Amino acid sequence: MIDATVSDPLEADEPKTLVEAAYKRLRRDIIEGMHPPGEKLRVEHLKEQYDVGAGTLREALLLLVTDALVVGQGQRGFRVAPISLADFEDITRTRVLLETEALRQAIARGNEEWEAGLVGAFHRLSRAEQKLAEHDPGATEDWEKRNRAFHEALIAACPSRWIRHFQHILYQQSERYRRISLFRQPIPRDIHAEHQALVDATLARDATRATSILSEHILRTLDAVKQMPQDFFARGKRP
Amino acid sequence: MIDATVSDPLEADEPKTLVEAAYKRLRRDIIEGMHPPGEKLRVEHLKEQYDVGAGTLREALLLLVTDALVVGQGQRGFRVAPISLADFEDITRTRVLLETEALRQAIARGNEEWEAGLVGAFHRLSRAEQKLAEHDPGATEDWEKRNRAFHEALIAACPSRWIRHFQHILYQQSERYRRISLFRQPIPRDIHAEHQALVDATLARDATRATSILSEHILRTLDAVKQMPQDFFARGKRP
DNA sequence: CAGCGAAAAAATATCGAGATTTTGTGTTGA
DNA sequence: TCAACACAAAATCTCGATATTTTTTCGCTG
């Protein structure tokens, strides 16, 4: 079932309990914006939507609280977590701190199997990018999955379970911001070239170069989101 | 109630729900070793010990899972998380990564109020150390609280909510290891002098020196735990 | 019109019963 | 002796009823 520091076992396995299944569905729905920031999550209503009992839904919501996708207030229920530029900036900079360290460790310790996994993930991501360009239905969803897999493959050889665990949480958070902001304003940018440069530097075992590229890659999203109109964040104000 | 990234609101307020209360008690009991690593946590039994219903206890256990103090397996209940030298090393190194960054940010941004808070926390900690030396009853508990408060005060001016959140989790983990290991083998070491040097460098706004001292301070615990007999970790093997 | 209080409606948190799953024990056969 | 199976006991998970809390609505007063 649930071990907090194992990198997302919930995606790897079929859910063993209804709590897990509801948690996964809710998480997906929040990240994808179906439940917008600040929305009240009423157990009495959602239990029907997700087809579980009230207690089971509470458990799922608690798990989402600890993912920081939901905030709860004792006896006053749950809300979708707000968004803000400051939060996104914090997430982004903390991601840079953790992911560059993770990449440094991976480059120092990774073997050929790790390299093969990275190259494969990059290839799959490239294919998804092509489908994005062709406006295939479901292409965005596919790209998100493969982008995530790519970033995970990049640091898969990092031995620090904790760094990977925290990275996973932050990645999830940034995915939510990305989905929300892209819906409003696609960002012109050659992401493929950025990924290519990252893979090249990594395979060359040039930690300094690779971490520099990764840092810029991650921070570029922050730059783009900063261009969003300010009213974009107003609806996510902390209650 | 519960907002995952606010630094431990559960300690700041009286619990608003039975879930919170049970969570806090269980967490305390696990950190203090009353429930040793690997122990099966049976809902049917614990509900009586903690005087709550089964569903409520499940919720508390879920919160502990996300603290990585408990592991759960779908339909097979919960166990106290195992301990290992490798895990403690990971925790320690990740703490160094996060806390030095947090201290860097705090030094860059902290004002006089932050300094005053730090000096106060150091003073209180020093008093607790005196009581430790005098073998006062409850002195260990007091010292743990004040040590925690000291480390939190040190990085209180770090603006990154996420770094503070992760630091909090890791601090908690390291507290559990420290309590377990000190019970076995008190470590000779002038902790007071280490804290003093840390405060001095921080108040002098010497980020390089302060982070170097902090890094050594944290890593010194790792060195000490490495001297533990190997059978110490055997009982915490991952099931 | 604004503020207050009371009552009604809606929602939350908790508990324990019941269905389901897991674990432990005993028996049998090779 | 060991493995496989059956069955009983224990434990887990889920649901919905109920007590409690919060929110909304309504009426009254200044």
Image (spheres, coloured by chain):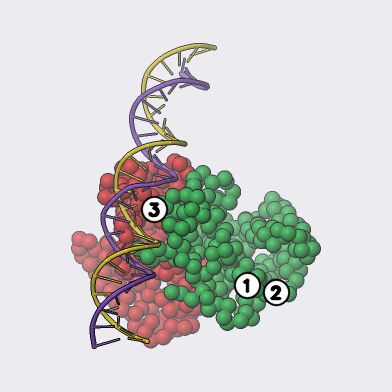
Chain colours: A green, B red, C yellow, D purple
Q: Mark 1, chain letter?
A: A
B160 versus A79 height, above or below? below
Horizontal and vertical percent position of residue A61: 46, 58
Q: Is residue A141 visible?
A: yes
Question: Could you say whether the residue bearing mark 2 is in a helix, strand or loop?
Answer: loop
Q: Residues within 10 Å of mark 3 (few under 14, many from 20)?
A: many
Marks 2 and 3 belong to one chain:
no
**Which residue: 55% across, 54% down?**
A25
Question: Does the residue at mark 1 contact the one at mark 2 (Cβ under 8 Å)?
Answer: yes
The image quarter in which residue B181 lies: bottom left
Separation (CA) of disc 1 from disc 3: 34 Å
Question: Could you say whether the residue bearing mark 1 is in a helix, strand or loop?
Answer: helix
Residue labelled with disc 2: A187
Separation (CA) of disc 1 from disc 2: 9 Å
Q: Mark 3, chain letter?
A: B
Q: Residue B40 has which mark? A: none
Residues B63 and B200: in front is B63
A108 versus A219 height, above or below? above
**Residue type highlighted by circle 3:** Glu
Q: Residue A181 has which mark? A: 1
**Residue type highlighted by circle 1:** Ser
Horizontal and vertical percent position of residue A155: 62, 59
The image quarter in which residue B76 lies: top left
Report the side of B159 relative to B42 (left or right): right
Residue labelled with disc 3: B59
Question: Does the residue at mark 1 contact the one at mark 3 (Cβ under 8 Å)?
Answer: no
Nearer-N-terminus badge (1/2): 1
How many discs mark residues in the rendered view?
A: 3
Report the side of A16 relative to B126 (left or right): right
Residues C26 and D29: in front is D29
**Which residue: 37% across, 65% down?**
A76
**Which residue: 50% across, 64% down?**
A69
